[in-house]
Amino acid sequence: MTQEQLRDFNEYMNELLADRKIQRMSQFIQHGDTTCLMHCKTVAYYSVVFVNKFHIKVDMKSLIRGALLHDYFLYDWHEQKLGNLHGFYHPGIALRNAMRDYELTKREMDIIKKHMFPLTLYLPMYKETWVVCLMDKYCTLREFFGNLFKKKTCNA
Ligand SMILES: [Fe+2]
Ligand SMILES: [Fe+2]
């Protein structure tokens, strides 16, 4: 990540993370011993690394904010009766919560709603959504099989 990207990353992350509402994600486990908040921060981090590596021009602020909010569903999905359907319905719940609590751009909404593609059939409309969609799967695999990989999560 370039110095400029790192500055943007920290600025956009910290702006959103300063809000108490988003900190609620730290109460819920996503995969393994990773909380939802840590998962979202890691997806945001790798999304920026990915666009940097492949020189993809994106709306950086929307990419980071969308990634941070993509799993803003705010419940413990392991305890849900319909836990196995969580994959299908949590993007809609995350989007509803995020729209209630924050002003979102169209790209941010697209990222949250469609990050589970192709499980959900909503086709991503923006590059930013494709990137988060891909990095979400990458980070999920790392969290599941954390011991097999050299674990590196973002603690920014
Ligand atoms: Fe998700
Ligand atoms: Fe996710």
Image (tube, helix red, strand yellow):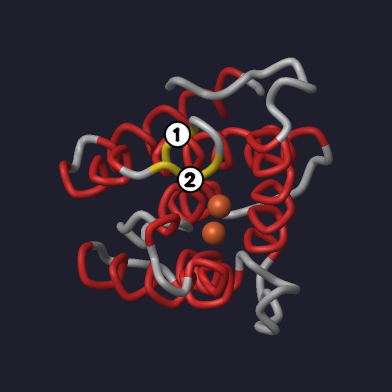
Residue drawn 71% across the image and 50% down it? 137
Q: Is residue 24 left or right of residue 58?
A: left
**Horizontal side of residue 109 vs 133, given as left or right:** left
> Dot 1 lies on which element?
helix
Nearest to the observer: residue 4 or residue 20: 20
Quadrant including the C terminus: top left
The label number, if any, that marks residue 38 in the structure image: 1
Q: Is residue 102 above or below residue 50?
A: below
Q: CA distance from mark 2 to mark 1?
A: 9 Å
Residue 30 tag number: 2
The quarter in which the N terminus is drawn is top right
Q: Amino acid at mark 1?
A: Met
Give the quadrant of residue 96.
bottom left
Which residue does the image show at 32% across and 58% down from the upper left?
75
Residue 121 picture location, percent across and down: 70, 84
- Name the front one of labels 2 and 1: 2
Position in image of residue 129 (x %, y %): 64, 63
